Image (spheres, coloured by chain):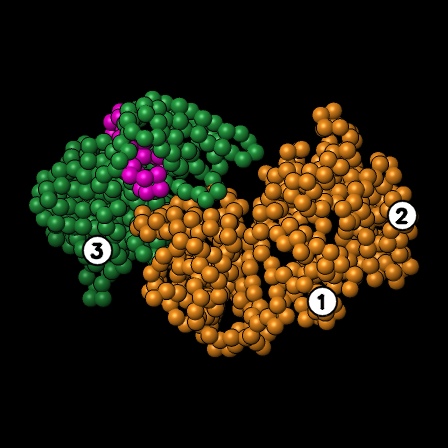
Chain colours: A orange, B green
Amino acid sequence: MRERSVLHVDLDAFFVAVERVRDPRLRGRPVVVGGAPEQRGVVAAASYEAREHGIHSAMPMGQALRLCPHLVRVPGDSAAYERASRDVFRLLGDYTPVVEQVSVDEGYLDLTGTQRLLGRAVDVAGRLQREVKERLRLDLTVGVARNRLVSKVASDFAKPAGLFDVRPGLEARFFAPLPVRALPGIGPVTGKRLADLNIERLGTLASTEEWFLEEVFGSYGPLLRSRARGEDDTPVCPPWELPEQKSIGHEETFARDSADFELLRGKLQELLEQAARRLRHEGLLARKLTLKLRYADFVSETRDWTFPNPTDHDMELLEPALELLQRMAARRTLVRLLGVRLGGLQRGYWQGSLWDARRVRERRLIAALDRVADRYGTEGLRIGRLAQSPAFPVTKRPVSGWVQKPTRGPSCIPSAHLPGPASRPPCS
Amino acid sequence: MSEILTKNASAMKFLIDRPAFRDALQRVEMAVDRKPTRPVLGGILIRAERDSVVVEATDLEIAVRYRIEAVQVDAEGWAIVPGRELVEVVRDLDAETVSAFLNEQRQFEMEAGEDRCTLVTMESSADPDPGGAPRKKSQQFPEIPELGAEPDVVLDKATFLQMVASTRFAVSRVHDSRFPTEGILFEVKDGAVTMVGTDGRRLACVRRPAQGAASQQRSVLLPKVLDQIARFGQEEPATALEAFFLGNQVGFRVGRLESFGRVLEGEYPNYDSVIPKGGKHVLRAQREQLSKKLRLASHLTTDAAAVVRLQVAPDTMEISAEHEGRGRAAATLEVEYEGPGFTTLFNPIFLLEGLKAAHGEGVELQMEDPARPARFRLGEDYTYVVMPLTTFA
């Protein structure tokens, strides 16, 4: 078999890095991205300076601020991160078509067979780093190895802004001194069980008898052992070979529990618009919609809706979602969390119904709103009903040049957010 | 009639030409319920009258009646026998004529040459009524209306069959809670008959002048009855088709074949309002050519993403498709078109089905805008409207 050559690339403290490109004053300071503590926000990303204070992602924001009082908090801007991510992966795609993006800031490249064209993998890795730094001002860490697993561990090892090349044949030697938790797939539970067996380093795990591991972990045991030796033959899957995404979902825990239907409706619309926008970005259509409510008493409830024809149309999605919400809100209990999920995803094209000419017109509007959101973020422009919802205290200045009339009824005229009290129509 | 009835104690008896019997049973077979909710619906009613034998079946969606005249009736009477078995046995009997009668056990017995077959009856004229008199009429079998001499409308059979073929393919295969689009609209108005089939994403509409179409009638029919007529009406020597609007049913008569279809409830969508009245892009193409190129491109589409791209420029159209991970195809053909170039997306299956049903050699496409419904003229008074596909990607 041909010697494989796989790169794992990882953008360091990605959200923070993007924020620092936008605002260089953030450089060198402890920065976190995430929601405000009074809104039960959590840390979505932390700069290395912040991490030194013991702050890590998923930590409640309140706790983070207590750990580091001079911490700078930036609210997240997912659209900006997605844009930056797209730029990076487009650049990586110039080197090999076999790029698998596993998350917004992480991916694998398969350089097998490109040596004559591009040179040694480790040199390519260096070029990638430089190019990403120069063109996008972002730090990239790269792990080079002959399989995915080792390249991933190598890049984790090399962070931040590092480059680590594990030569073929040296995988086990590289792994041996590392703690078992360095191996992807070993979480706190497996880690704890291994520690109980006095297995703390990957080298120990790799040399443990197979029958013994099988006894403890079942069929997972032998796999664990071979992975601890740096063995892995999972392919790097370019997008067209990836199994289709199963669902797209968004949920939000409210700052304060609420039973205000108008607020819930506004939130639902916002979440749904986010999900639908992602759907459209991926070129997918959804067949199923699931609405989830968690009440103040932590009772959760979900309801499904199946569309006769798959759709990526905001209004087509919103109509049944509102109906579900109406039925679920009948419980008359404060709601703590609201979530929507679009499932039954498939690649394809939207086909309107002959009976709903309106939907075709609305599509132009959606396309225009998407363009605005891509450029200015989702705050810039929204569908009319939403702007009037108490879920959206009107705080943002309008996108310049927009003149609009107040909207009434189930309309879909876009309206800009204007300063003023939330209860007032956006413009009078 | 009453003479024979009383004399033979209602024990039906007749001699029948086997091929004629077989053909008649084949015609009613489609109406025999395969999973009957009531046993009689899985049966066939055989009625021997003075000089003919009538067979009937119904599954409550459709009903079929066929009259056989190549018979010699010795005793009048009737019986309901298991449908599927009767059809199959008569098909495989090995003789030119069949002698059939109700035996002492009130079973339906058939003799054909050396062969003999007895079928149980679900009900028959030999069953006594409470008073002890012979039963004149079935108490279980749904009554199928008699068609009179004055149809609501008369159409040339070939025309009718063409109309069915022109609309049938567009009918919805799924239930729509808003409109009864699993059915075909059958409308008589202003001296013409209109048929419409739609699934909400495309709509086929055809119109033909007809005799006696002075009255206004409008019913939505399940396609099954039209399928039945399309299949067996063809074989009848008669050239006219008569239609009768009977309230919750529509009856059709072609020669000795009478078929009835249940009418779907609910308001059929206003088809006229979705047919675009004009369009700034008007294009003409050869049907064969267009079909061929569409088929070529459609090989590189998937079921989930059935889409072809039509790119139109003056006098030329390029049809292309791409199958992610498999490849792409592009085919060019000559068209008659002047005007600005435009691009639109269609489900190739919708287009191919329409073109297959088209009447002439040329077709015309009219479009106001690549995202709005496209209107195809597939023949004289034959319109096909298709909703294009759109994408944000």
Q: Nearer the viewer, residue B279 or A402?
A: A402
Q: Nearer the viewer, residue A348 or B99?
A: A348
Say which residue label 1 marks: A70
Q: Is residue A334 above or below residue B248?
A: below
Q: Position of residue B78 (x, y in %)?
A: 23, 51
The region drawn magenta spans B350-374
Q: Tell me whether marks 1 and 3 sit on the same chain.
A: no
Instruction: Write the residue at 89% across / 60% down.
Output: A197
Distance, label 1 to label 3, CA atoms, is 80 Å
What amino acid type is highlighted by mark number 2?
A: Ala
Crowding at dot 1, Cα within 10 Å, few <14 / some 14-19 / many 20+, comes out as few
Instruction: Write the residue at 66% across / 33% down.
Output: A96
Instruction: Write the residue at 32% across / 56% down.
Output: B178
Identity of the residue furthest to the top in this view = B334
Tag 2 secondary structure = loop
Q: Nearer the viewer, residue A325 or A276?
A: A276
Say which residue label 2 marks: A176
Please tell me which of labels 2 and 1 falls first in the chain.
1
Is B354 inside the magenta-drawn segment? yes
Say which residue label 3 marks: B248
Distance, label 2 to label 1, CA atoms, is 40 Å
Q: Is residue A144 left or right of residue A254?
A: right
Q: Is residue A133 left or right of residue B40?
A: right
Is A195 inside the magenta-drawn segment? no
Distance, label 3 to label 2, CA atoms, is 82 Å
What amino acid type is highlighted by mark number 1?
A: His
User: Which chain letter matches label 2?
Assistant: A
